[in-house]
Image: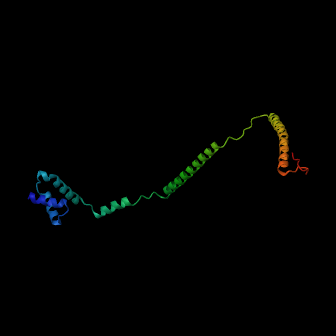
Amino acid sequence: MDSKIEQLLEKYWKCETSLEEEKELKAYFNENEVSEDLKETGMLFKYFEAQKNLGISKIDFDHRVKAIATPVDRGKVIKMIFTTAKIAAGVLVLVAATYLVRQEIRKSYPEEVVDTYSDPQLAFEETKKALMMISKTFGKAKQEAGKITVFNEAEEIIQNGVTKEGKEKIEI
């Protein structure tokens, strides 16, 4: 008998057995004492039979599936709280990002001019000194610019051959 069972097992592992042959294997492993070399296979068939006998009723199965598939209704208030929390988190991220960007922009610009004098009269006197110094410098610059005018007139005479007064230039 063991040789026939071994042949059936070979076919079973290759998925070539018929339903009758599988029933014969199940009956053999569930009813007979199994030899040592087939003991693990016998335990497998006994496990299959035990699982088949466990079963579950249709009502119990439906109840379990519905309990898993149906989400728990939290109520309108809790949904509203979650929605509000999501919106608040988005606004908070937006405000934080705006603040950080403004800080980085401020770092790239120089600091604003701060008053260096607390006494207005002293500030006025210092401003007068600075303006007088600029005025003197402009006076010197005007004199130097007058020299440039002489050079411009000379250049014009050379290029056009006529002076500013309309006289012809003198050839040397």
Q: Quadrant of the N terminus?
A: bottom left
Question: Could you tell me which residue is drawn at 18 percent across and 61 percent down?
Answer: 12
Q: Is residue 38 left or right of residue 145?
A: left
| Residue at the (20%, 55%) spot, across then down | 47
- Which residue occupies 17% across, 52% down? 40
The residue nearer to you, when weighing 70 against 145, is 145
Quick one: 130 or 98, which is closer to the camera? Answer: 130
- From the viewer's perspective, is 149 left or right of 2? right
Q: Position of residue 109 (x, y in %)?
A: 66, 43
**Quadrant, the C terminus:** top right
Residue 152 image position (x, y, % from top left)? 83, 46
Residue 91 x, y percent position in the rendering: 57, 52
Residue 42: image x %, image y %?
16, 55
Q: In the picture, residue 45 is in which quadrant?
A: bottom left
Residue 140 appears in which quarter of the rendering? top right
Instruction: Determine whether 5 is above or below 128 in the image.
Output: below
Q: How many marks?
A: 0
The residue at the point 61 percent across, 44 percent down is: 104
